[in-house]
Image (cartoon, rainbow, N blue to C red):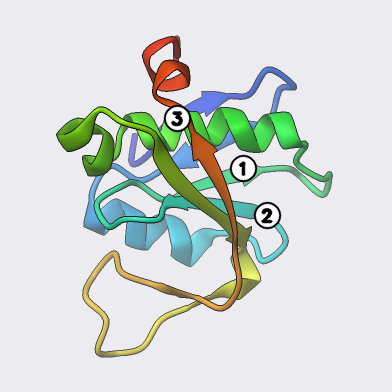
Amino acid sequence: MKFRQFTTSSGKLVLSGKDRETNELLIKQAEKENIILHTAKPGSPFAEIKANGKKASKKDIKETAIFIAKFSQDWKKNHEDVKVHYFLGKDIYKNKEMKTGTFGVKKFKEILVKKKEIENSKI
């Protein structure tokens, strides 16, 4: 299996990278209208909510943000709240100067994942 994965409580599949290379693969295959997540700080997996033409709910986004935060370097180093950015696949860009697994984002929204949410996560 190339990616980590889980299913949200509403039944949506979420795929996430495990390292730079799988983050690169994930973003290359990501659909333009699906929501993608990554922590505000470097060193986390990217994740895509596979909505299959449907809209991801706020709950889907929150569950995925907790999942991303849990696997982030920010969480592993600090064990504090983690800021997660979410955006559409169409808002991602890559320049040739960017390293493997690194991307730019044109516009994003931010969600704060609380320490307790990460600690209580069963994902």
Give the residue at the far bottom of this rendering: 96
Q: Label 3, label 2: how many angstroms apart (C-alpha)?
A: 17 Å
Q: Residues within 10 Å of mark 3 (few under 14, many from 20)?
A: many
Q: Residue at x 38, y 72 (%)?
A: 103
Q: Are marks 2 and 1 in contact (CB under 8 Å)?
A: yes
Residue at which label 3 appears: 67
Of the image marks 2 and 1, the number of the one nearer the N terminus:
2
Name the mark nearer the viewer: 1 or 3. Answer: 3
Q: Amino acid at mark 1?
A: Ile
Left or right side of 63 for 60: right
User: Pointer 2: residues within 10 angstroms few (<14), some, or many (20+)?
Assistant: some
The amino acid at mark 2 is Asn
**First reached walking from the N terminus: tag 3 or tag 2:** 2
Residue at 30 percent of width and 90 percent of height: 96
Task: Say which residue label 2 marks.
Answer: 34
Lateral position of residue 86 relative to residue 33, left or right: left
Q: Amino acid at mark 3?
A: Phe
Q: Which mark is residue 49?
A: 1
Label 2, label 1: how far apart the Cα atoms are: 6 Å
- Is 47 placed above or below 66 here? below
- Residue 14 position, x and y percent, is 55, 35
**Residue 32 rendering spot, x and y as whole percentages:** 67, 66
Image coordinates for residue 31, horizontal then vertical, percent: 64, 60
> Which SS class for mark 3?
helix
**CB under 8 Å between callouts 1 and 3?**
no
Q: In this view of the protein, which residue sits in the foreground, 36 or 111? A: 111
Q: Secondary structure at mark 2?
A: loop
Earlier along the polypeptide chain: callout 1 or callout 3?
Answer: 1
Query: What separation in Å lies between label 1 and label 3 (alpha carbons)?
Result: 12 Å
**Mark 1: few/some/many CA within 10 Å (<14, 14-19, 20+):** many
| Residue in view at x 64 percent, y 72 percent | 90
